Image: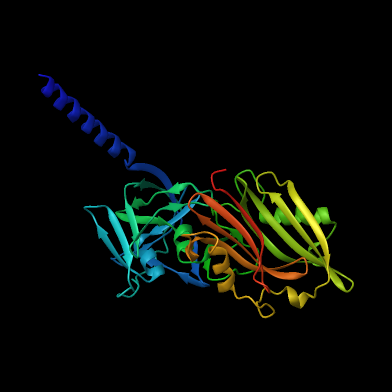
Amino acid sequence: MKKSRLIQTTACAMALSAALTVSAFAATNVTATLRPDVTVRIDGVACDFYNAQGKEVHPILYNGTTYIPLRAVGELMGKNVNWDGITGTASLSGTRTTGNVTGTPDTAAKRTDVTFTLRPEYHIVIDGTERTFTNANGTKIDPAIYNGSIYLPLRAIGEIMGKRVSWDGATQTVRLDSTTSGGDVTDFDTNDPSQSAPTGGVTLEQAKQTALKHAGKTASQVQFVKTQQDWEHGRKVYEIEFIVSSGTGYTEYDYEIDAATGKIVSYDYDAENYTLSQNTNTNANVKISEATAKQTALSRVPGATAANIYKFKLDFDDGHWEYEGEIRYGTMEYDFTIDANTGAIIEWDMESIYD
């Protein structure tokens, strides 16, 4: 009798455990937006994507994240794609053995709401390593299904490829670049690319005007060195940097402006004695290469690879060249500054992504 009850109790516990496991990974239908008006450019080249039947497929936006189909991801990464329906595993590996799919452009497609199915139980394996995806805030992002195709977050894929992902609101373009390209480009974090600014917030241009007004300058009097959106301590901000000629030297202005309120978070300016030609973003005048600087930073974070470097650039600050970058690994974010001529780490900050 006792044995029978024990068996029944054990069976119930196992059934409950299985039910909880299924529930934890249950597919969820959500409303997303089909975005045929969004262009994807890889190192400056516009990319169109097609399914196996040659029908054009378009990016989909959900909860501030832009997704593209798994087949398109394979083409971008130059890898073969395989799907194991039994284990729910999509694998991208090796060197792609087939060419990119072509077809007829779908010029009639319009921006519209669609049903998007989130599939947290799916596994995505790239070159033998299972990958999980997060947005700029460190929040987990799940693979999804639309019209029978798996979709993955474009930003995360771009970062795995070692590229900088940015959003050009003027042309409705997501850019994946091997190096930072100049211009008024906002970081493509979790923003809706249909918006030039967060809902209820200010645009990049408005932020620039706020900085100029505070500095008592006009656009014609300055040269913008950096104008981008970033995620800083739990809020989106615009980083605005420009220089102004002042006799034999230049004055550098740095502003951080809250993207939601338009208020100045911080600012400073420094009189520098450097020429405009020095301010071009080139490593011709530095002794430490980008690769060496990156390796120096990665050596401080055991287990991290180049894929974990989310930001990296060469900048001229306080009279000298330096590399500035950010590594995200596990639950931590590491911000670093490295002297571009000595290779010494000038600044090193770390904090939890979830703070």
Whether residue 212 sits left or right of residue 79 in the image: it is right
Q: Please state if 302 lies on the left or on the right of 288 as rendered.
A: left
Residue most extreme to the bottom: 284
The quadrant in which residue 287 appears is bottom right
Task: Name the residue located 43 percent from the left edge and 58 percent from the top edge.
Answer: 59
Q: Give 75 or 38, whichever is nearer the viewer.
A: 75
What residue is drawn where x is 62% and y is 67%? 313
Q: Residue at x 52, y 72 (%)?
A: 43
| Front in this rendered view, residue 342 or 307 | 342
Q: Position of residue 117 (x, y in %)?
A: 35, 46
Question: Can you name the residue that lies furthest to the right here?
Answer: 247
| Relative image position of residue 182 (x, y in whole percent) | 64, 69
Regarding residue 326, the answer to whether it shows in the image is yes
As displayed, is residue 297 above or below residue 10? below
Name the residue located 57 percent from the left edge and 67 percent from the top edge: 296
Q: Is residue 36 visible?
A: no
- The type of colouring in the image is rainbow
Of 51 and 161, nearer the camera is: 161
The C terminus sits in image quarter: top right
Percent from the top left, x then y, of residue 40? Answer: 48, 65
Q: How many marks?
A: 0
